Image: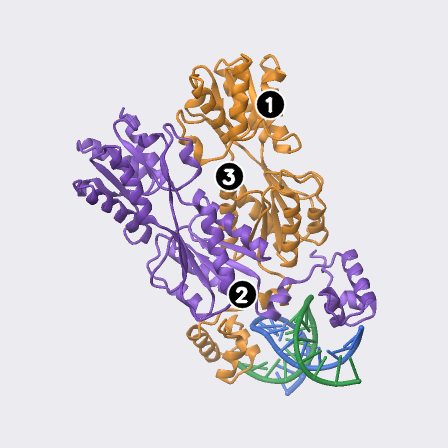
Chain colours: A purple, B orange, C green, D blue
Amino acid sequence: MKSSSITIKDIARILGISPSTVSRALKDHPDISAETKKAVNELAVQLKYQPNAIALSLKQNRSNTIGVIIPEIVHHFFSSVISGIEDVAYDAGFTVMICQSNEKHDREVANANMLLSHRVDGVLVSVAKESTNFDHLKLLKEKGLPLVFFDRVVPVVEADCVVIDDEEAAYKATRHLIENGRKRIAHFSGPRHLQISTNRKNGYLRAIREAGLKEDADLIMEADNFEKANNAVRMLADHNKLPDGIFATNDLTAIGAMQAAQKLGIKIPEQIAIIGFSDGRLSGITNPTLSSVDQHGYEMGSTATRILLNRIMNPEEDFKPIKRVLQGDLVIRESSI
Amino acid sequence: MKSSSITIKDIARILGISPSTVSRALKDHPDISAETKKAVNELAVQLKYQPNAIALSLKQNRSNTIGVIIPEIVHHFFSSVISGIEDVAYDAGFTVMICQSNEKHDREVANANMLLSHRVDGVLVSVAKESTNFDHLKLLKEKGLPLVFFDRVVPVVEADCVVIDDEEAAYKATRHLIENGRKRIAHFSGPRHLQISTNRKNGYLRAIREAGLKEDADLIMEADNFEKANNAVRMLADHNKLPDGIFATNDLTAIGAMQAAQKLGIKIPEQIAIIGFSDGRLSGITNPTLSSVDQHGYEMGSTATRILLNRIMNPEEDFKPIKRVLQGDLVIRESSI
DNA sequence: GTGAAAGCGCTAACAG
DNA sequence: CTGTTAGCGCTTTCAC
């Protein structure tokens, strides 16, 4: 059906006045007489008139919409970010267009094009693991769209970003293990080409070196999900190389490690202390509860959005990229003491 | 800056042809000569022309966008639903506008108006816990927007919906506890005015009655989050009324109950068997792992979206509301055997 | 095979 | 104080 919604013209016709007068009346323009305003507004309410945001966008070359490209909505961290984005956007009268890349490069490119087509006023991006080419993001910039990265940043494109201090947080996490007397600390890391992964690894290495511990290549492995962590622990056990501490690049990985160890009859934290990173809700719920770094997803989303909206409102006050670094908070629970 | 994006006119001007020809060439219209098409398409690529979806929407009175109103994005269940929505929409060339109500009625109303203004082609809704008046949703219908409810349905508004068979799933869950010899089974339920809550409670009651067990009002309480479950268990313990089984209306509640019990030195599942409902990722991770009902969030989202898109494509083939009931799958883990 | 013109809903000069 | 006009980018009759 699509019952044709009422327009400013309809109101004008009914009231026997011109569309522009209606338009002005609705915006409380000073020129319009009080009675006209009253008549217009009353009729508008009565007819349940809704301004057509599309027409407005076309006219003003401004959609009051921001786009979000995010790897996977289902991760607690990312959904908290979205929540923060949505809340700030809502308060500013903006709507949010969400696209998930599912970690696929192709899909990320398609998402960027879609957002471009829809003439969003700005874009928030956390890049897909798979992405190594960033022409699609450069294109957004070229087209004059403000761009703010969060969490997964790409240095190739000059843009604002909001990250947490992964290096420092990883350092603190590892240091905490060291202070508890752990000597053979493993690191389960993410893919090499993601900044956050290398940053976390670097923090780990800094703590290890600073403490004069041996840097053991066998204890550093790429494993960034539940299953891989499971396998990694089993492999270490098979080779009689089990560590006494593990710092994992995310919580699910940590939990995978923990459960694999427990299945082998290893006591957590007595025999192996474990600490994770971020993913949120899970950490308070495992047994033992999991020490972790709180990544403040909601705050990251709201901060990034505030920066973006600011760019949208004040275009190009000769651009200097803002880099906002949030502190990751070490939350010590049972798995590491 | 907002570097003015190139339009069909630009291409026309450069090529010395008319905008309409360009438009047709881009859509591969049969009337247009091969060379013209070639020239146009090449230039389009070269200039990185992006069709203006806004202009298109205005013209065709069709935004190729669907709106989603959802209580809280951060819940695993809801974020899986969104993921399902987004995937299906993406495949159909639709974008998704996400609004979260944060369980607030006012915000839900504002969301509905925003979506209306943005002339989305259809809306997916799961209502806020707080909402008891649904005029804003009726308005969407009146305006001719297809509406599909998922999970949290409201009977007042005639619309399609996708739910899981909460009653049956709750029945199966409770039955499972009974079959394992539990006699005093408690139910931690959600707010009375939510259909899903009463449905789950009814399933529980049906199983209890059918088994000839005593229906004990002291064992049925409104508790639908971690903290409330904690308190509930402590209270039951204080009054020496601890059950030997608990069916909770969601996983976090179940986990709250489990941890409170464990703190009291009670063995799960030996002394109390516990089973939850839905929230996803958590259940495999607790110790013991939590039996639960898989609510198939992704499938719910994708199904609802398919129904919605179908309504959008085939408007008003004299409307009979579709009610799609998904089965909740009982997933038995360690906490209940 | 291509172009001219109108119009989607709205706003903003410019007139009066 | 209000109306007329033009135009945002695009499609689509209707001409030629």
- The image quarter containing residue A208 is top left
Q: Is residue A267 left or right of residue A12?
A: left
Please report, as a chain letter, where disc 1 is located.
B
Q: CA distance from mark 3 to mark 1?
A: 23 Å
Instruction: Quickly name the residue at label 3.
Output: B77
Please report, as a chain letter, where disc 3 is located.
B
Give the SS element for disc 3.
Answer: helix
Q: Nearer the viewer, residue B134 or B57?
A: B134
Q: How many other residues sit within 10 Å of disc 2, few (<14), some (14-19) or many (≥20)?
A: few
Quarter of the image for the C terminus of chain B: give it: top left
Give the SS element for disc 1.
Answer: strand
Q: Where residue A110 sits in the image (x, y, percent)?
A: 44, 60
Look at label 2 and name its amino acid.
Met
Q: Where residue B187 sits in the image (x, y, percent)?
A: 57, 22
Q: Where residue A265 sits in the image (x, y, percent)?
A: 27, 24
Look at label 3 and name its amino acid.
Phe
* Residue occupying the point 27% across, 40% down: A175
Q: CA distance from mark 1 to mark 2?
A: 50 Å
Can you tell which of label 3 and label 1 is closer to the viewer?
Answer: 1
Instruction: Quickly name the residue at label 1.
Output: B221
Q: How many other residues sit within 10 Å of disc 3, few (<14), some (14-19) or many (≥20)?
A: many
Instruction: Quickly name the residue at label 2.
Output: A313
